[in-house]
Amino acid sequence: MASCGDGVVQVGEACDDANADNTDDCLDTCLAASCGDGFVQLDVEMCDDGNDIDTDDCPASCAPAVCGDGFVWEGNEEATTQTWTTPTTGVSPPDPTRAHFACRSTRRE
């Protein structure tokens, strides 16, 4: 009887590679691997926690959270307003009339 995992793509299966390895491009459920499925796809994703929360250590992009990614990593960083002053070299800041945002770690090692 044909079933998922037999190596033959059947109706309702996106793929069937006949293995239980969920780090390749075909899950053992015969669905194509993708960001957000909860499995780290080898050589494609750096993390995959299976949720769409952008403020945890693995945003929905499946790349680890880092300062400057556009999200504030809860419990690890906070957004701070960075004010600019004109350096003594005479070089002007990017835009002295606007606030610029930077990250500040809240982690305690």
Image: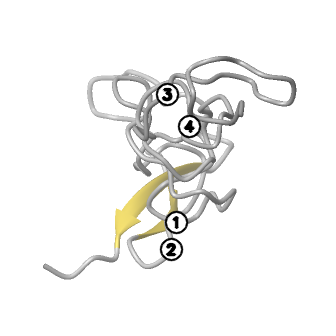
Discs 1, 2 touching: Cβ within 8 Å? yes
| Mark in the foreground, 1 or 4 | 4
Q: Residue at x 77, y 28 (%)?
A: 13
Real-space CA distance between mark 4 and mark 3, rounded to the nearest whole angstrom: 10 Å
Q: Which mark is residue 17?
A: none
Q: In the rendered structure, which disc, 1 or 2, sits on the residue that comes first in sequence?
A: 1
Where does the image place residue 106, in percent across and percent down from the top left? 34, 77
Q: Residue 17, how many percent across, how many down? A: 52, 22
Q: Is residue 19 above or below residue 71?
A: above
Q: CA distance from mark 1 to mark 3?
A: 34 Å
Quadrant of the drawing holding the N terminus: top right
- Disc 3 from disc 2: Cα separation: 40 Å
Determine which residue is flagged by label 4: 27
Label 2, on which residue? 74
Q: Position of residue 37 (x, y in %)?
A: 62, 47
Q: Earlier in the sequence, mark 4 or mark 3?
A: 3
Quadrant holding the C terminus: bottom left
Residue extending farthest to the left is 109
Residues at marks 1 and 2, CA–CA distance in whole angstroms:
6 Å
The amino acid type, in three-letter code, at marker 2 is Glu
Number of the label disc, if any, that sits on residue 18? 3
Task: Give left or right: position of 108 versus 98.
Answer: left
Residue depth check, mark 1 versus mark 3: number of the one nearer the observer: 3
Alpha-carbon distance for marks 4 and 2? Answer: 30 Å
Residue that sits furthest to the right in the current view: 11
- Foreground mark, 4 or 2, reads 4
Q: Amino acid at mark 3?
A: Ala
Q: Residues within 10 Å of mark 1 (few under 14, many from 20)?
A: some
CB contact under 8 Å: marks 1 and 3 = no
Label 3 secondary element: loop
Task: Left or right? Give the position of 28 relative to 85.
Answer: right
